[in-house]
Image (cartoon, rainbow, N blue to C red):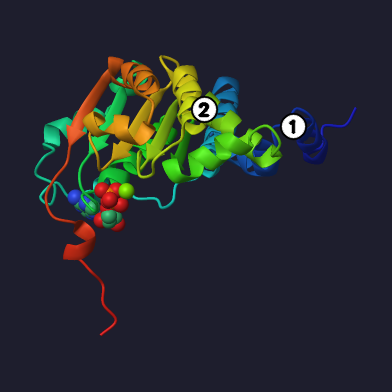
Amino acid sequence: MSYSVESLQRQFKLFRMSETAKELPDFLRKAESHSWTYQEFLHELLSYEESCREQKMIEKHLKWARFPYQKSLNEFDLQEQRSLSSRQLKQLKELSWLEQSFNLIFLGPPGVGKTHLAIGLGLEAIQNGQRVSFISMGELIPLLKTEEYLRKAQIQLNRIRKADLVIIDDLMYMAMDQHEANLFFHLINHLYERSSIILTSNKGPEDWGELLGDQGITTAILDRLLHRSEVIHLNGESHRIKYRKSIF
Ligand code: ADP
Ligand code: MG
């Protein structure tokens, strides 16, 4: 029987511990120089593999989330957004609303930070090991309508249905017909009490009826969205206009 480092590395790979396999020579050296006990050695090895796997999972979840851009909550300036206190932001960052399947609804005019906040919370959730999906309402409806025959739509919608947090950006930007409102209702109904939803919109729930068309469906959607939810009104002037970049 051979105990060469190479054959040990091969065995680690066999058990899908390829990161550990790569670092094994280094671990063996450290174990000798620091005189690690057997337990310490195993602990170091397994913790290394564990943290590599966590990192890989976070990277995979970041890719699946499909954020339009990545901006953290630390980059959100509360001096610029007086409607949210630092205590409230800290509370949101702690994610207990997500554990309790609460929905968040960010309302306000364009450029006040609704999408930034939603993405920041999404990033926080991913770091916490959760699955997140970001989609704008403009993309969601075509996706739902093509689900029956487009493989790509099926994959993306499956990820949305399995996510712990679904961010639906710019709700009600467009008017929906009865069929679209129905598809949207079925998705919300599936997510209801299973995941958290963050919605951003420049119109309040009182105006959603006119855009969803059917009053019955609107009531059913609102019922599920608002049942366990926090509505957060953001205001102030548009960050985009205030910090407008110009060429000259
Ligand atoms: P909307 O409310 O229209 O979704 P966004 O969240 O997309 O607006 O914000 C528009 C731009 O302004 C983004 O680049 C965002 O990072 C920035 N922004 C908005 N509010 C703030 C803020 N309070 N602090 C830092 N950046 C902000
Ligand atoms: Mg936005």
Give the position of the N terminus as an image quadrant: top right
According to the picture, the residue beneath numbered tag 2 turns out to be 183
Q: Position of residue 93 (x, y in %)?
A: 27, 32
Q: Residue at x 76, y 37 (%)?
A: 9
Q: Does residue 93 appear anywhere in the picture? A: no
Q: Position of residue 162 (x, y in %)?
A: 54, 24
Front-lying residue, 124 or 4: 124
Q: What element carries label 2?
A: helix
Q: Which residue lies furthest to the right in this view?
A: 1
Q: How far apart are marks 1 and 2 (CA)?
A: 48 Å
Where residue 144 sits, quadrant-wise, is top right
CB of mark 1 near ligand 1 (< 8 Å): no
Quadrant of the rendered image containing residue 231: top left
- Quadrant that contains the C terminus: bottom left
Q: Which amino acid does label 1 sit on?
A: Phe
Q: From the viewer's perspective, is residue 240 above or below residue 229?
A: below
Is 240 drawn above or below residue 149 in the view shown?
below
In the rendering, at what x and y percent does residue 158 appear?
A: 60, 29
Left or right of 51? Residue 23 is right
Residue 174 appears in the figure = yes
Whether label 2 lies within 8 Å of ligand 2 gets the answer no
**What residue is shown at x 64% (from left), y 35% (from top)?**
155
Instruction: Compare marks 1 and 2 and give the one earlier in the sequence.
Output: 1
Disc 1 secondary structure class: helix
Which of the labelled discs sits on residue 12, or is there none? 1
Q: Which amino acid does label 2 sit on?
A: Leu
In the image, taking residue 199 as reference, residue 141 lies left or right, namely right
Please name whichever residue, 29 or 95, is drawn nearer the observer in this view of the structure.
95
